[in-house]
Image (tube, rainbow, N blue to C red):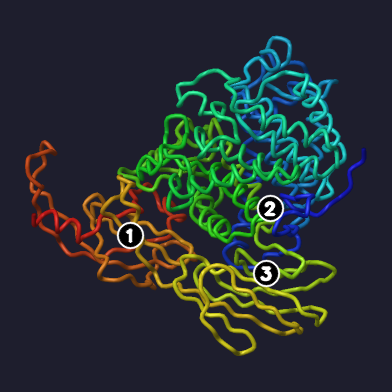
C-alpha cells in the first residue's frame, strides 16, 4: 500500500465523531513573541544540540556498529537510546515543515540510511537486543523498551509521511509495524511492553497509511494491558507499568507517569478510531481525576522520585516534586486528544498551564542544557554537572547538557517543532483559537477558507487582536478561549465591548476583510491557594500572572533566607520594571516578612517556635525562567504571613 503526503499535523483523527478538527502546524504560522522565540531557539540550538550530543555520546554510532555486526563489543548507552535518535528525526521533520531547513533534510536522509543498514530482514530494528553476543529479542518485556523504541520510530515516520520526508524512512517503519503485527498479533506473543508508546504510534501510522492491521494491533495492546502479564516491581507493583487493572476498569492514572500518559493517549486514539465510547469515557474519567487530585500547579505530573510515579491523591510535595518534562509533554498529548474529542475548554487550559510552566521550564536560555525534573522548591543550590559528560543526576537543581537517560531534551525538541499543530482547531461552523501566539492562521473549514492575523505579546500582556485578512463574506463563527484564571475579560467586536466569562466566547457574523476582534484578559497578578488536603503546601500561597506561575529565587534577594520568608497576601502584588537579568519577563513585587528564629539547635520543642518578623519586599520571576543565573535556591509555594503570625501569637 502506498502512502501519500497528508497535512503536517501531529494528531490526525480519521473519524468525524470528534467535536473539533486539528489544524496542520503549517496552517498557523507563528511569527513573533514568546513562542516564536522558543521555536527559534529550538531550530537554532535545541535540535542541533540533541543531534550533536547523540553523536558525541555514541548513540548514533550504535547503528553503524549494528551494520558492521560489532555491537557485541562496541554498543554504548542504556537499552532505550535508539528512541532518542527517532525523536530527533521527528523533531527535524516537523521543523522542516514549519520552515524549510536543508540541513535537517540532509540529516534525516543520512540517519535513515543508518537505520536501513541496521534493520533485520524481518523488519526488526534495535541496537540493544537481537544480535550475536547480545540479549535475545523480547527477552525482557518488563524493562526492555523494544516496542517503546519502535513506537518512536513509527512516530518519526508519521512525521515524514506528513511532511514529505524520505520514502525509505517510511518503508523502514512499515516493515517494523508489520513485524510487530506478526509477532504480537492475536495469535502471537501474548504480552506487552513495560513502557507504553507503541499504541498511539500504531494508531497514527494507521491514520497515515490506511492499514487497518496497525489500528487492530494498537487495540490488542490496550486490551491486553492490566491482566498481570508482566512481573512485579518494587515501584508500587504492576501499577508501575499499568498492568494491574485493565484500562477500562481503572479509576485514575497510576504508576510511572510517562508510561501512564502515553497509554492514555493511545487508548484515546483507539477509542476515537473504533468508536469505543466506553473506553473513551473510562480514560477521560481517569485523566480528569488525575487533573483534580494528582497534578501540580505547574501542570506537572508525577510526585514520587521512587519510580518516577504518581503519588496518592493530593500527595504533591514541592521540594520532592518529580514532574518529569516528558510527563508534561505526554499530558499535553492526552489533553489535546480530549480537547479534539470533546471540545471542553478545561483541556485547553491545562495545555496552556503545562506548556508555559512545565515544558518551557526545561531548557536553559541558550537551549543547551535541560531540566529532567521540575521541582517546585529548591532548598540548597544545585551542583553543576561535569561538562561534556552525560549526567547521572536528574534532580539536583541545575540543568545538564545531556543525561544518561536523555528522553526529555528530544521530547522537548519535537514538541516545540510541532507546536503550531496544537494552537487552534476548526469545525463545520468556523475556527477556534485555543492558545495565543502572534502569527497568521490560514485554514479551511467545511467548504470555506479564511485567513486571520493574530497580534499579541501574550503572555506578558493580555490583549489578543484577531484581524480577518481574507474571507468569503459569508457567515461563520470565530471562537476564542477565555482562560479560567481570567476573572474578568472584555471582548470588542466592531467597536462594541462586552464582558465575557471564562470558557469559550464565540462570535458569529458575516465577516469582512479587515474586521477585528479584540480580547482583553485580566493580567493582574494574583494569589493562589491549594486544597488543604495537599499537606505539603498547607498555609502557603503561590503567585500567578496570566498563564504563568511565579517563583521566589535567591539571586533577586541574596540577603534573604527563602526558608524563612513569608508572604503578605493582604498587601497585593505589583508588576516591576526592574531589570533582573532575564530577557522578556515581567517581574513582580510582593511584601512579606523574614522570620528570625531564636535558636539553632534541636528543631523540635513542646511550644510553637518564637521569633520576630522583619518586613521585607521581594521579587518574583516566572517559574520557567529560574536557574538561569547560576546556582540558586527557589520556591513556588510561600508560607503566608497571616498563618505564621497566628501560630506565634497562640
User: Residue, x 64% and y 25% (percent of image)?
Assistant: 193
> Marks 3/2: CA distance?
15 Å
Q: Earlier in the sequence, mark 3 or mark 1?
A: 3
Label 1 crowd bin: few (<14), some (14–19), many (20+), radius 10 Å = some
523 and 234: which is toward the camera:
234
Of circles 3 and 1, the one toward us is 3
Label 1 element class: helix
The front one of 649 and 599 is: 649
Reply above or below: 260 against 609.
above
- Could you tell me how far apart the alpha carbons at marks 1 and 2 are, in whole angstroms? 35 Å
| Label of residue 27 in the image | none
Residue bearing mark 2: 418
The mark closer to the camera, 1 or 2, is 2
Q: Which residue is outermost to the top?
A: 133
Q: Residue at 63%, 20% (x, y): give it.
A: 141
Q: Position of residue 505 (x, y in %)?
A: 59, 73
Residue bearing the label numbered 1: 556
Residue at image position (64%, 45%) is: 280
- Number of numbered discs overlaid on the protein picture: 3
Label 1 vs 2, first from the N-terminus: 2
**Residue 439's mark?**
3
Residue positioned 81% across, 21% down in the render: 120
Q: Kindly indicate the quadrant of the structure image that contains residue 619.
A: bottom left
User: Where residue 295 sits in the image (x, y, percent)?
Assistant: 45, 47
Tell me which numbered mark, 3 or 2, is placed earlier along the sequence.
2
Secondary structure, mark 3, is: strand
Quadrant housing residue 456: bottom right
Looking at the image, residue 48 sits to the left or right of residue 396; the answer is right
In the structure shown, which secondary structural element does the residue marked by tag 2 occupy? loop
Amino acid at each position: 500500500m502506498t502512502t501519500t503526503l497528508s497535512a503536517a499535523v501531529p494528531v490526525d483523527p480519521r473519524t468525524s465523531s470528534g467535536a473539533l478538527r486539528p489544524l496542520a502546524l503549517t496552517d498557523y504560522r507563528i511569527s513573533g513573541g514568546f513562542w516564536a522565540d522558543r521555536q527559534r531557539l529550538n531550530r537554532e540550538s535545541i535540535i542541533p544540540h540533541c543531534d550533536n550530543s547523540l553523536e558525541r555520546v555514541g548513540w548514533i554510532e550504535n547503528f553503524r556498529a549494528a551494520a558492521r555486526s560489532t555491537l557485541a563489543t562496541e554498543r554504548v548507552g542504556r537499552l532505550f537510546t535508539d528512541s532518542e535518535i527517532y525523536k530527533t528525526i521527528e523533531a527535524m521533520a516537523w521543523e522542516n515543515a514549519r520552515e524549510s531547513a536543508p540541513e535537517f533534510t540532509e540529516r534525516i536522509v543520512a540517519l535513515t540510511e543508518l537505520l536501513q543498514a541496521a534493520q533485520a530482514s524481518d523488519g526488526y530494528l534495535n541496537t540493544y537486543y537481537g544480535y550475536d553476543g547480545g540479549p535475545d529479542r523480547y527477552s525482557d518485556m518488563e524493562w526492555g523498551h523494544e516496542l517503546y523504541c519502535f513506537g518512536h520510530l513509527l512516530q518519526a515516520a508519521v512525521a515524514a509521511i506528513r511532511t514529505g520526508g524520505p520514502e525509505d524512512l517510511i518503508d523502514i517503519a512499515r516493515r517494523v509495524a508489520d513485524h510487530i503485527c506478526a509477532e504480537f498479533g492475536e495469535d502471537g506473543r501474548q504480552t506487552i511492553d513495560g513502557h507504553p508508546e507503541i499504541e498511539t504510534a500504531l494508531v497514527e501510522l494507521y491514520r497515515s497509511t490506511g492499514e487497518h492491521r496497525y489500528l487492530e494491533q494498537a487495540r490488542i495492546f490496550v486490551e491486553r494491558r492490566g491482566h498481570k502479564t508482566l512481573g512485579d516491581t518494587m515501584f508500587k507493583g504492576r501499577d508501575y507499568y499499568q498492568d494491574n487493572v485493565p484500562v477500562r476498569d481503572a479509576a485514575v492514572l497510576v504508576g510511572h507517569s510517562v508510561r501512564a500518559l502515553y497509554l492514555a493517549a493511545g487508548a484515546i486514539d483507539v477509542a476515537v478510531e473504533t468508536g469505543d465510547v466506553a473506553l473513551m469515557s473510562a480514560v477521560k474519567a481517569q485523566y480528569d481525576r488525575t487533573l483534580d487530585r494528582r497534578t501540580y500547579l505547574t501542570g506537572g505530573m508525577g510526585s514520587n522520585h521512587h519510580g518516577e510515579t504518581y503519588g496518592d491523591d493530593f500527595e504533591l510535595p514541592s521540594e520532592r516534586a518529580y514532574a518529569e518534562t516528558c510527563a508534561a509533554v505526554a499530558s499535553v498529548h492526552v489533553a489535546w486528544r480530549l480537547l479534539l474529542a470533546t471540545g471542553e475548554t478545561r483541556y485547553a487550559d491545562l495545555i496552556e498551564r503545562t506548556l508555559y510552566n512545565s515544558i518551557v521550564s526545561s531548557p536553559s536560555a541558550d537551549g543547551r542544557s535541560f531540566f529532567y525534573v521540575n521541582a517546585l522548591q529548591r532548598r540548597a543550590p544545585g551542583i553543576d554537572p561535569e561538562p561534556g559528560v552525560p549526567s547521572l543526576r536528574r534532580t539536583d537543581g541545575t540543568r545538564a547538557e545531556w543525561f544518561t537517560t536523555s528522553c526529555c531534551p528530544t521530547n522537548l525538541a519535537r514538541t516545540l517543532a510541532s507546536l503550531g499543530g496544537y494552537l487552534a482547531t476548526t469545525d463545520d461552523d468556523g475556527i477556534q483559537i485555543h492558545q495565543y501566539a502572534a502569527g497568521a492562521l490560514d485554514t479551511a473549514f467545511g467548504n470555506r477558507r479564511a485567513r486571520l492575523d493574530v497580534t499579541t505579546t501574550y503572555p506578558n500582556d493580555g490583549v489578543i487582536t484577531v484581524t480577518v485578512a481574507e474571507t468569503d463574506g459569508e457567515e461563520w463563527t470565530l471562537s476564542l478561549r477565555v482562560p479560567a484564571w481570567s476573572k474578568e475579560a472584555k471582548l470588542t467586536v466592531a467597536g462594541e465591548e462586552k464582558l465575557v466569562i471564562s470558557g469559550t466566547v464565540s462570535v458569529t457574523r458575516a465577516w469582512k476583510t479587515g474586521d477585528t476582534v479584540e480580547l482583553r484578559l485580566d493580567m493582574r497578578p494574583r494569589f493562589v491557594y491549594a486544597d488543604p488536603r495537599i499537606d505539603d503546601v498547607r498555609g502557603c500561597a503561590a503567585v500567578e500572572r496570566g498563564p504563568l506561575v511565579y517563583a521566589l529565587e535567591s539571586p533577586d534577594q541574596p540577603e534573604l533566607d527563602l526558608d524563612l520568608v513569608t508572604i503578605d497576601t493582604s498587601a497585593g502584588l505589583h508588576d516591576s520594571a526592574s531589570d533582573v537579568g532575564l530577557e522578556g519577563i515581567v517581574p513582580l513585587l510582593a511584601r512579606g516578612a523574614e522570620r528570625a528564629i531564636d535558636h539553632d539547635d534541636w528543631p523540635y520543642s513542646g511550644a510553637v517556635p518564637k521569633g520576630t518578623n522583619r518586613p521585607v519586599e521581594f521579587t518574583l520571576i516566572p517559574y520557567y525562567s529560574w536557574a538561569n543565573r547560576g546556582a540558586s535556591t527557589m520556591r513556588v509555594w510561600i508560607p503566608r504571613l497571616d498563618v505564621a503570625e497566628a501560630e506565634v501569637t497562640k
